[in-house]
Image: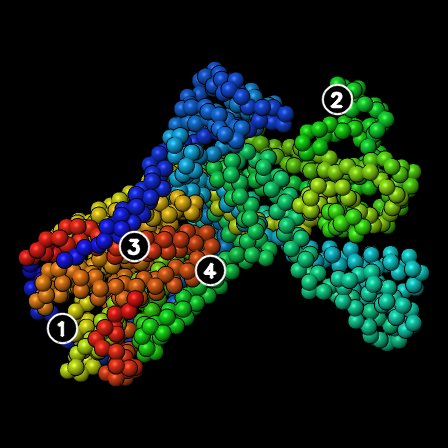
Amino acid sequence: MSNKAMAKTLNIDFMGKRRWAAILSGSVLVVALLSMLLRGFDFGLDFTGGTVIEVGYQNPAELSEVTAALEAGGFVGATVQHFGSRQDVLIRLAPDADEDEGTSAQLSDRVFQALSTAAAEEVELRRVEFVGPQVGEELREQGGLAMLFSLIGILVYVALRFEWRFAVGSVVALVHDVIVVLGIFSLLQINFDLTVLAAVLAVIGYSLNDTIVVFDRVRENFRRMRKGTVIEIINASINQTLSRTVVTSCTTLLVLIALYVLGGEVISGFSLALIIGVVIGTYSSIYVATASVVWLGLSKTDLLPPEKEGAGADVRP
Amino acid sequence: MNRYPLWKNLLILGVVLFGLVLAMPNLFSQDPSIEISPARGVEVTAASVDEVRAVLDNAGVPYKDVELSEDGRLLARFALSGEQLRGQEVIERTLAERYRTALTLSADLPGWMRALGLNPMSLGLDLRGGIHVVIDVDMESALDQALERYVSDIRAQLREHKIRYLTVLREGSEILVKFKDEETRDAADKLLGREFRALELTNSERGGTYLIQVALLPAEQEQIKDFALKQNITTLRNRVNALGVAEPSIARQGERRIVVQLPGAQDPGRLKDILGATATLEYRLVDTEHSVADAVSGRVPVGSRLYRDRDGVPILLKRRVIVTGDQITDASAGFDSQSGTPAVFVNLDGQGARRMRNVTTENVGKPMAVVFIENRTTTELVDGEPVKHTQKVEEVISVATIREPFGRRFQTTGLDSSEEAHNTALLLRSGALAAPIQIVEERTIGPSLGQDNIDQGFRSVMIGLGLVALFMALYYRVFGLVADLVLVVNLVMMVAVLSLLQATLTLPGIAGIVLTVGMAVDANVLIFERIREEIRNGSSPQASIRAGYDKALSTIVDANVTTLIAAVVLFSFGTGPVKGFAVTLFIGIVTSMFTAILGSRAVINLIYGRRNVKKLAI
């Protein structure tokens, strides 16, 4: 019962603090963009090309020994790290400019042979991934295009279903979310691979979901509430949808945390990107998307149905 | 009162039951198995089952079952993949003469499920282990080869028609033909325009010499590229079949790539050997004077050799080679202009043409055969050192009767279908004209990592589901429990749709399932919050339920459509892992709209709809 009482009395002046939020968002965006420009990304194999080999030892493996075994086999400059557990070792080799791609593809076989000869125990080849440099370039390109096209698709849909200010507001919020998630990956130099890209696109979907719910309520209230300023109506709408926003974010975060903790190393980047994205997306649907609509000068007449259709006009199939 | 009409309840129940049945095969374990298919001329019978059992028993390899499948094969099931590998070794060692083996996974389904054609979800390579390779076909050199071919063809044509030219040479993506005077040039232009429809000819004059600039028409370029890709796919398919993988997939990706997927395969080295195989072919006369039966029993006449065709039928050919693959300049499939039946058109170079004319003039009415020869290299580990073996595979791919003498250009008719004509043309070209290929992407997943991925994925789905269910039950009480019920149903429906479509489930796909579990409750949250609001505004319980569902609907649709847009974009731009995620996300959103809106309403109507309720447990 306590939560009901709480929800009833909630009347937070969200829009009153929109200037502070703008300053916060602005500075986070600047930091994120600066980091992307200056530090760049720790791009994964998918985008850079190269070879990744994951091997499993029966006993905890010493990284220095693995590196020594690799160097003995003539592989200098490989990155060696534990992956998930101390028995698992991940070896990353940069794409070799001298060799043509045919021989790079054979590289993994030779590396595995070098490790097997050096180790006293049996080594298990768990995973080999080789991506040629030109494929890496294409994947980067496709990723950018995918992001662009989903933003355009969303812009069109929201503009059709609502109004252009809402479309612009939601896309501004989505761009904001994408930049912040990418910025955090750049700032902390977390490995950025194809699955993270998929997660960023899923963030777009999720964050939009949140924004649409708020917008929907704003539209409904504009048509229903005769009294009150634009700011008041928007504040009321956000307050009315707040408990839903919090509950959905919580359930989504719960599964994402389960995925992050239990899902294994391969998709940890994916879950992390989504966790960040869900938090940011919740914030941005209020302070970026809705605030943008206010700044764009939404007035009460903008959302009134074009003709007199009565109260049922807002319930669409 | 909130009641669904009976038909609506029954419809929902029907869909859910249908989903349950479709999802059911996934409850059965997927056994590591060996698919045993008979060699040519061997039939699988009940006796073969006993034979395989005996072999496994003798070697002390534990197995679950050996059974006869409908398609005339045997399937041996094992509990562990280690036993499966040992089993394959034993069978290969003792029964290789008559059977071929391939590793596979197969669900241990009861008969009625198999009869209904039900299947479990198909697992991606990252979940079941295997090799994924992307191969790039070098289109530039395919075009280069084509131009080189035209250079010699143009020379031959001009010479044949006694048109004097200065030079024929290649310059970048063009061929330049130079002449001393305008007249000769115009005569050549007429001839070439008639002979080579696929070329674009431009006349010009430069410093006293008269030129024809020759370029490939865009359509011809497309055709060359298309052919190069198809030809590589055909030869790859032939070679990959030799690898002993149950469901190899070789597919075209975009304009110049080929994706090869070998589920269960563990040795990328062997695949690379196979990709590196070279092929050639030889035209030989058929030996019609001697008996094939004699040759099969060991008395091969001097000057002849015994070959086999694709179906294993023996055929006796003369030892003398007429023409080899590198003398073929082009081969294409088409239709005979007179009879309209499928035909293969072959072009030879000058030297080949002369030999061919001599031999065919002497042998009109006699059959001639084409032998396809492939050199496969296999690498084996001997005492820890890789040792390469080269194996020569020879097959007769076509036999035809010489109707009249021919030389540079000829056609082979009497093929069964245009499909066969097409394949023969591809094989003929691969003799010398194969566009070079290289591996641009490789992903190999070991079986243990695949299993780990399944386990981790399964665990995260279950724990995520549990946490969400607990949260919802605590927060929304009875309504929360209803949401939990439809959430589980949603999971079943997702599995059902994935099984039905046989869409490949990957690890990112599981992540998509987990994410939709979190997001699927959103629709219910929206509805329940609305109901609470209505109650706060003083509406009656029944009216609140109705208004809650009605008012939340447009919001839910809007929110989900936008996520669907993102999923569709992900699917169309993504490759491999991203696609898998997009598929489950898409399916999850669609099924959740059904379960969260219609399903939950039906249950809530059943609980509250008929009574005169004072208060809702929400």
Confirm whether circles 1 and 4 share one chain: no
Q: Is residue B543 visible?
A: yes
User: Callout 2, which amino acid?
Assistant: Val
As measured in the structure, the alpha-carbon distance from the residue carrying label 2 to the one carrying label 4 is 56 Å
Q: Which residue is mark 3?
A: B594
Q: Which quarter of the picture shows residue B585?
A: bottom left
Q: Chain of mark 4?
A: B
Q: Chain of mark 2?
A: B
Q: Which residue is mark 2?
A: B296
User: Callout 4, which amino acid?
Assistant: Phe
Give the image location of residue B547, x and y in percent: 18, 64
- Camera-side mark, 1 or 2: 2
Confirm whether circles 3 and 1 share one chain: no
At 73% from the left and 27% from the top, the residue drawn is B314
User: Callout 3, which amino acid?
Assistant: Phe
Q: Residues within 10 Å of mark 3 (few under 14, many from 20)?
A: some
As measured in the structure, the alpha-carbon distance from the residue carrying label 3 to the one carrying label 1 is 35 Å
Could you tell whether A108 is left or right of B306 in the image? left
Q: Chain of mark 3?
A: B
- Camera-side mark, 3 or 2: 3
Q: Which residue is mark 1?
A: A12
